[in-house]
């Protein structure tokens, strides 16, 4: 729980729930009155004099009291082992305070740590190609090895790959939701979300019970970009939501990086446009990102050796694992390298796949997970 009494926490929840009071008006009210409780106790005339509020919102603030909403949120915090972090708390993301409209409060499961200030967002399409999957996994793994926290939005495609790869490398990752903590989207990522909270954080500005409405995702994207040093866009079509995140990053004074894609691929049209317009810096390897960010960090991040798989492997599996890399290889190629038949090689590969060590791609191609 944040460093607030239950009464204070209730006032933060109440003011945030007033229709028409978004982040900007919330901050304006706090600048004028000092606390949510004081704002809720002010007269309509006093509230209306606040910059950006006016009579209509003032009446809404004065008349809005929803004890049932507050009680439900407090109960669900305990049920989901979560807490509320306000922008005045020590463990609120420091970089997020720098943006124009930081969320006044965040619902957090897990915890944002000081080390997460060295973070990079990885975003992109939900409909990844083999190339896009490879790039998302490669950059996530490499950034994790340099000690960066990988931030994304838990969506299908690039987001999911970025989170999972960071976790496989024992790195930290943070997921930002466009819904309540009890309504993750997509629903099949609930298990992934539970793992993320153990090795990072899941956070949202939306209260429990909030569904994944389309209007919430641009709001989420400003948090993804605003809490990080920069955003990497991997494989984005011309209408991809990842481009919204890139625009937020630019407006917030953050770096924007883009991984170029095939010129004739529709899924790369948006990301290639970012490069052509000069909006994003073209990157081909993680060192391109490190070189750009080192002056802002004030130090040169040091790469750690990647950890091996966290399970025992018989000799034949260890030999096969040594042959599989991040570049897709056909089962026949792997079989030949180890003097096995294709059937024998496939049996070993499937055993490794069950352990989560390798992944099969279409056409009997295999890569490391």
Image (cartoon, helix red, strand yellow):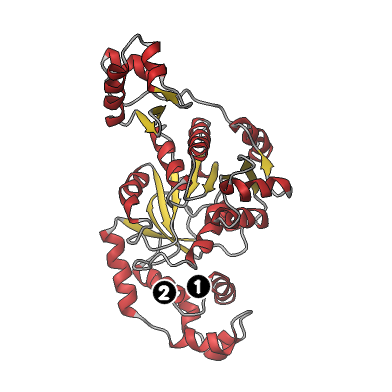
| Residue denoted by label 1 | 35
Q: In the rendered view, does 121 fall on the left or right side of 329?
A: right
Residue 163 as seen in the image, left or right of residue 120: left
Q: Secondary structure at mark 1?
A: loop
Picture quadrant of residue 161: top left
Q: Which residue is at the front of the view, 103 or 35?
A: 103
Mark linked to residue 291: none
Provide the secondary structure element on which disc 2 rests: helix
Which percent across, then down, holds residue 118? 55, 41
Q: Earlier in the sequence, mark 1 or mark 2?
A: 2
Q: Residue furthest top?
A: 339
Residue drawn where x is 50% and y is 39% of the image: 136
Q: Residue 230 location, x and y as percent?
A: 60, 46
| Front-most of residues 55 and 291 | 291
The picture places residue 184, in percent across and down from the top left corner, at 36, 58
Above or below, 224 against 63 in this view is above
- Please state the horizontal and vertical placement of residue 236, each as a whole percent of the image: 57, 49
- Marks 1 & 2, CB-CB < 8 Å contact: yes
**Which residue is label 2 attached to?**
11
Q: How crowded is the residue under tag 1: few (<14 C-alpha within 10 Å), some, or many (20+)?
A: some
Instruction: Please name whichever residue, 248 or 158, is drawn nearer the observer in this view of the structure.
Output: 158
């Amino acid at each position: 729980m944040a460093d607030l009494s239950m009464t204070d926490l209730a006032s933060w929840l109440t003011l945030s729930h007033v229709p028409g009071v978004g982040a900007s008006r919330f901050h304006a009210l706090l600048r004028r009155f000092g606390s949510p409780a004081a704002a809720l106790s002010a007269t309509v005339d006093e509230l209306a004099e606040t910059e950006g509020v006016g009579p209509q919102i003032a009446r809404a603030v004065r008349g809005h009291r929803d004890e049932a909403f507050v009680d439900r949120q407090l109960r669900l915090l305990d049920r989901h082992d979560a807490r509320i972090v306000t922008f005045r708390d020590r463990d609120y993301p420091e970089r997020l305070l720098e943006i124009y409209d930081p969320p006044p409060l965040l619902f957090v499961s897990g915890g944002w740590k000081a080390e997460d200030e060295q973070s990079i967002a990885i975003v992109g399409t939900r409909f990844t190609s083999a190339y896009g999957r490879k790039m998302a996994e490669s950059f996530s793994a490499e950034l994790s090895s340099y000690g960066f926290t990988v931030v994304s939005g838990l969506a299908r495609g690039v987001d999911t790959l970025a989170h999972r790869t960071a976790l496989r490398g024992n790195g930290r990752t943070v997921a930002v939701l466009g819904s309540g903590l009890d309504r993750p989207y997509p629903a099949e990522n609930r298990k992934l979300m539970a793992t993320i909270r153990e090795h990072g954080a899941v956070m949202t500005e939306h209260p429990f019970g909030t569904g994944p409405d389309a209007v919430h995702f641009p709001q989420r994207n400003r948090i993804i970009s605003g809490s990080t040093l920069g955003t990497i866009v991997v494989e984005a079509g011309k209408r991809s939501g990842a481009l919204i995140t890139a625009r937020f990053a630019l407006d917030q004074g953050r770096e924007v990086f883009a991984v170029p894609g095939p010129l004739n691929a529709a899924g790369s049209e948006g990301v290639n446009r970012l490069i052509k317009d000069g909006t994003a810096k073209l990157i081909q390897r993680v060192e391109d990102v490190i070189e750009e960010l080192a002056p802002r960090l004030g130090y040169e991040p040091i790469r750690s050796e990647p950890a091996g798989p966290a399970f025992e492997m018989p000799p034949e599996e260890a030999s096969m694992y040594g042959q599989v890399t991040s570049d897709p290889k056909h089962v026949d190629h792997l079989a030949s390298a180890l003097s096995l038949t294709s059937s024998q090689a496939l049996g070993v590969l499937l055993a490794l796949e069950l352990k989560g060590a390798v992944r099969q791609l279409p056409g009997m191609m295999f890569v490391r997970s």
